[in-house]
Image: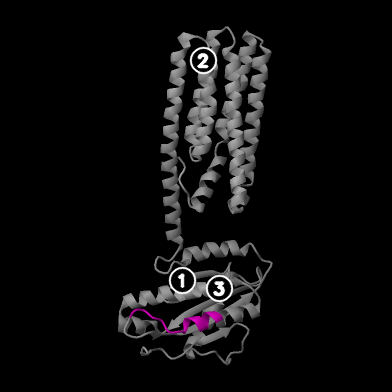
Amino acid sequence: MRREEPEPVYRELVDALADNVVPMVILCGMTIATGVHIWSIVPSRLVAAASLLCVVTMVVKIVTILHHQRHRVAYRRASLDRVRRHERGHAVTTIAVCLSIALFSVAVYALPYPALHLLPVAIAFCYSAGLIARVSIRPHIASSAILSLMVPNALAIALLGKDHVFVAVILMVFAVAGLQSVAFVYATARGAVRLRLELEALARHDPLTGVLNRLGLREALAGMTADASRPVVVHALDLDGFKGVNDRFGHGAGDRLLVVLAARIQASVRDGTIVARTGGDEFVMVQHGDAAAARDLAERIHDQLIRPYDLGLAEPVTIGVSLGYATGLLPEATLEGLIQQADARSYAVKRRGGGILGIDEPADPPMVASPPVRALTRQA
C-alpha cells in the first residue's frame, strides 16, 4: 500500500503522528467509563484486568505522542534512522492499544449480558474510524492496527453463536472498507504534502538557477543567526559584462550563462554555505569561517566564474566578476550589516575594473582582476 516516499514527504508524514493526542485522551476516558459501568453491573475481574490493560497501553501511547510534540523540532532535524525508529515506536504503541481493546472486547463478550456486548463494538468502531482519519498518513500502521482490532472482535462475536455470525461478517466488511479508506486517505495526504513542499521550495528558490532567492536567503540567515559561535563571512558578487552577453547573444544565452554560473558557485562552496541569487546578475554567499577561509572561497569562486562558458553558441563567452566580502562575529556584527558592507565592496571593486575586495583590505588594494569581457574564438 505504501509507495516509495521522498525523504521530505516521509518526514512530514511521520511528524503528523504527533497530532493524535486528543482522540487518544477521549478513547482512554471512554474505556475507563465503560469499565466502571460494566463493573457496576457485573464485577468481573477479567473485564477489570482487561480494562486496566487498555488504559495502561493508551497512557503509554499518549505519553509517546506528548514526547513527540515536546521534541518536535529535534525530530524534524534528526537523522533519517532516528525518524524511522520514532515511527516504529508509534507503530508498536498503536498496535498495542488495538490488541488490548480486542482483549477487552473478548472479555466483555464472555459475559452473559448481551446489552453490554454493544460497548466494545462501539469502542472498536470509534477507534477504527479514528485510525482511518488520523493514522492513515502511515498506512502500514493504520492497516495493521485495524486488523489487530477487528479480526479478534469478529472471531469472538462469531463464537457467541449462529445469531452473531452476521455481526462478525459486518465487522470484517467494515475492516476491509477501512483498509480501502486508509489507502485513499494516505494517497490524498501524500499528494497534498508533496505539493505543499514543492510550492514552498518554489517560493524560496530562484526558478532559473535553483539557488535560494531573497525569501529563502532571509530564512536561511534567520537560522544562521542562532549559531553565534563562529565568525560569519558574507560574499556579494556582481557580473561584469552580463548585459553585453544579453545584447549580443539574446536573453536565452544570458539565462543559460546564469544557470552554468550558479552551478559553478555551488560546486565551489562547502556544505553549510548559503548561496542565493538576489538580483539579475547578483549573488550572495554566506559561510562560517575566518578571514583566511573567506579569502580562499572568494578566490575559488572568482577563478571558477571567469573561466570561459560554452553556451552552445558559435564561440565560448567569458565575463568579469566583481566580488566583495565582509567578515564579522555575531551578534556584534549583524548579517544585514555584513551584506551591506560586502555589497558596497562589490560595487567599489566593479568601478575599478573587477576582481576581489575584502573588508579587511586597504582602500586601494592590489586586486585580483577579472579578465576583460569578450567572446573567445573556439579553437579547431
Give the camera-side residue of 7 and 255: 7
**Residue 326 painted magenta:** no
Residue 315 on image: x %, y %: 34, 86
**Residue 304 painted magenta:** yes
- In this rendering, does residue 346 appear at all? no
Mark 1 and mark 3: span between their CA atoms? 15 Å
Tell me the quarter of the picture where residue 260 sits: bottom left
Q: Quadrant of the C terminus?
A: bottom left
**Is 237 on the left or on the right of 312, as rendered?**
right
Residue 162 on image: x %, y %: 47, 9
Looking at numbered disc 2 in the image, what kind of residue is underneath it? Ile
Q: Secondary structure at mark 3?
A: loop
Tag 2 residue: 157
Tag 3 residue: 269
Give the camera-side residue of 162 and 73: 162
Q: Secondary structure at mark 1?
A: strand
- What are the residue bounds of the magenta stretch? 300-312
User: Label 3 near label 1: C-beta < 8 Å?
Assistant: no
Of the numbered discs 1 and 3, the one sitting upstream in the chain is 3
User: Label 3 near label 2: C-beta < 8 Å?
Assistant: no
Q: Please tell me which residue is depicted at 58% across the width and 43% down the height of the picture.
A: 87
Q: Colour scheme in the image?
A: one colour
Q: Please tell me which residue is depicted at 46% across the width and 80% down the height of the picture.
A: 238
Q: Please tell me which residue is depicted at 46% across the width and 26% down the height of the picture.
A: 175
Tag 1 residue: 277
Viewer-side label of 2, 1:
2
- Badge 1, how many Cα within 10 Å: few under 14, some, many 20+? many
